Amino acid sequence: MTTPSLDAHLRVERTGFSLDLALTAGAGEVIALLGPNGAGKTTALRALAGLLPLTAGHLRLDGQTLENPAAGLHTAAERRPVGVVFQDYLLFPHLSALDNIGFGLRCRGRSKKESRAEALPWLTRMDLEEHAAKRPGKLSGGQAQRVALARALAIGPRLLLLDEPLAALDARTRLDVRSQLRRHLAEFDAVAVLVTHDPLDAMVLADRLVVIEEGRVVQAGTPAEIARRPRTDYIARLVGLNLYQGVADGRRVKLEGGTAVTIAEELTGPAFVAFPPAAVTLHRSRPDSSARNVWELTVAGLDLHGDQVRADLTGPLPLAADLTPAAAAELDLTTGATVWATVKAAQTHAYPA
Amino acid sequence: MTAIDTAVAARAKRGSRIPLALLLPALLGLVFLVLPLAGLLIRAPWSAMPSELSSAAVWDALKLSLICATSATGVSLVLGVPLAWLLARTEFPGRRVIRALVTLPLVLPPVVGGVALLLALGRNGIVGRWLDSAFGITLPFTTTGVVIAEAFVAMPFLVISVEGALRAADPRYEEAAATLGASRLTAFRRVTLPMIAPGVGAGAVLAWARALGEFGATITFAGNFPGKTQTMPLAVYLAMETDPDAAIALSLVLLAVSVAVLVGLRDRWMSTP
C-alpha cells in the first residue's frame, strides 16, 4: 500500500474527556466517524481542522506534517489545506451565496471580481445559479447546505471535513441532499471525513466507517462489515440488531448470565451472536415450536417503529422484537405482560469476538 | 368558550383595570420628563429666534460642538472597537479588572474626569510634561483637549455597546473564516465587524450624543474659550447668566439635534420590544 493521504493520530486530553483516535485514509476515500453524542466525533473534527490543538500524536496530510505537538508544530487552521462544512453551515449572513463561496479565494489574495468569477462555476455545479445574489437567510436548508459545501470545496482542500452534514435538514430534504452529497463526495479527489450519529447517512455516504465511543475506536470497517458484525451494543442498536457476547461451544453460545443461544454454525471461543428483532416470534403461552431458543420474558415497553410494533423485553435475555400491530393486538401485549419469545437458530448470526 | 377566547377576555379585563398605585406614579413620571421640555418650547422667544441664532457666536459653538463630538466618536471607534474585541474575545489575567476600569468613566463625575485628565495630560501632568518638553505639544485648553475630554467620557459607552454585540455574535463564524484561510485580523474585518455593525453604529451614536452634551470634563480640562473650546453646553451655561433668551435658543438647537438622533435610531430603540 502506498503512503496514505491522511495519516493522523489524534490525542486530545481535556478534563473529564480524552480522545485517542488513529485515522488513515487514501485519496478519494470517504470516512465516516460514527458514534453517540459525546463520543468525541466533533472534537476529532475540530482537531483535524486545527481549531483545537492536539495534546499528543500527529497529523500528516499528503506527506506534509501539519501538527506534531512533540516537535512543537501546530499549523494554524487558516494555513491548512482543509475545508470544513459545519453542522449549521455558518454561512456569513452579510454576504451573498456567491461571495460566501468566494470568501476563501478572497483570503488567498484574489480581488472581489476574480473571486466571484472563480466561485461562479461552483454555483453551477451545485445548481444554484439563480440564487447567486441571495443572502443565506433567504436560502432553503438544502440550498444552504450546498453553498456551504461549495464554499469549503472552492479553496481546493486536500481534506474535507463535514460535521453532521444532514442533521439540520428535515426528513424530506434529507433524502435529496444525501444523494447529491454522495455524488459530490464521489467526485472529490482528496480525503473526506464526515461526522454523524446517523448510521444511514454514514452507510450511504462513506466508504469506511470508524465507530467511536468515549473517545476510542470500537470498530472500523466497510458499512457492510459493520452492519453484519457489530461489536458493541451501540452499533447493534444502530443497525437494528440484538447483540450478545459470550463463549461459543459448538452450536451454542453461553452468555454471561448463564443463558445460552443456539446458533446455526459451529463456533468455539469468545463470540458475538446477533439476530434482528424481526426474527423474534412472541407467544402468550409456552410454545411447542421446534425453535431451540425459547425464553420467558416480560414486556418492558412498546412503541411504533415504522409500521411495526417494537417490543422491548426484559428477562434472562433482554431483547427487542418486531411484530405487526395486528399480532400485537392479538397477543394482547401490554407493559408488564409475560411472553414467550422464540428465535430459530438459522436466524441468528454468530462470529468470533 | 374556547381557551383562546378566555385568554383574550382575561387580557382585555386585565387591561381595563390598571391599578391606581401604578398608574399615578407612571403619569407623574411622564409629566416630570416631558414638562421641562414643554417649558423650553413654551418659553422660547420664537420671534427673536432668527436674530438669536444668526449671531456668529452661536454657529461657532455649534460647529465646534459637532466637530469635537464627531472627532471624539472617531477616536472612540478607532480605539474602542479593538478594546471591546480584546475584552470580548480574549482571555488574559486581570481582564475583569480592565473591564471595570474601562467602564469607570461611565459612573465617574465628569468634573473628576476633567481633573484627572489635567493631572495626566496637563502641562505639569505625568504624560503632559513629557509631551510638552519632547514635542512641544500642549493639550489642555485647546480644541484637541475638548476632543480628548469628550472621548474620555464617551468611549466607555461605545466599548460597552460593541462588547455586548461581540458577545452576542457567534464566535464560530470566526472559526469558519479561519478554516477558509482568513487570519484573525481578516476574520474580524470581513466577518465579525459586518456582523456587529448595528451594535457598533448604536454605540457610536450613543457616544456621539454623550460627547455632544459633555460639560464637566470639557470645562475643567479645556476651559471655556469662545471659538476654541466653548462648545454648545458651555455656551448655554454661560448665556444663562447674561442672556437667558440666547440660552433658550441654544438649548432648542441642542434639543433639535437630540431629537434628530432619536428619530434616526427609532428602529432600534423606539420600537416596542
Image (spheres, coloured by chain):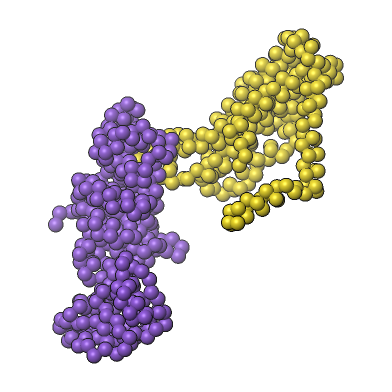
Chain colours: A purple, B yellow
As displayed, is residue A234 above or below residue B36?
A: below
Question: Residue A233: image x %, image y %?
Answer: 32, 72
Question: Residue B120: image x %, image y %?
Answer: 69, 31
In-image side of A303 versus A159 (left or right)? right
- Most foreground residue, A277 or A121: A277
Asked whether residue A136 appears in the rendered view, the answer is: yes
State the residue at coordinates (84%, 18%).
Answer: B244
- Most foreground residue, B147 or A171: A171
State the residue at coordinates (30%, 59%).
Answer: A33
Question: Residue B230: image x %, image y %?
Answer: 73, 19
State the residue at coordinates (73%, 38%).
Answer: B108
Q: Quadrant of residue B52?
A: top right
- Most foreground residue, A317 or B272: B272
Q: Residue furthest right?
A: B241
- Most foreground residue, B159 or B26: B26
Q: Quadrant of the C terminus of chain A?
A: bottom left
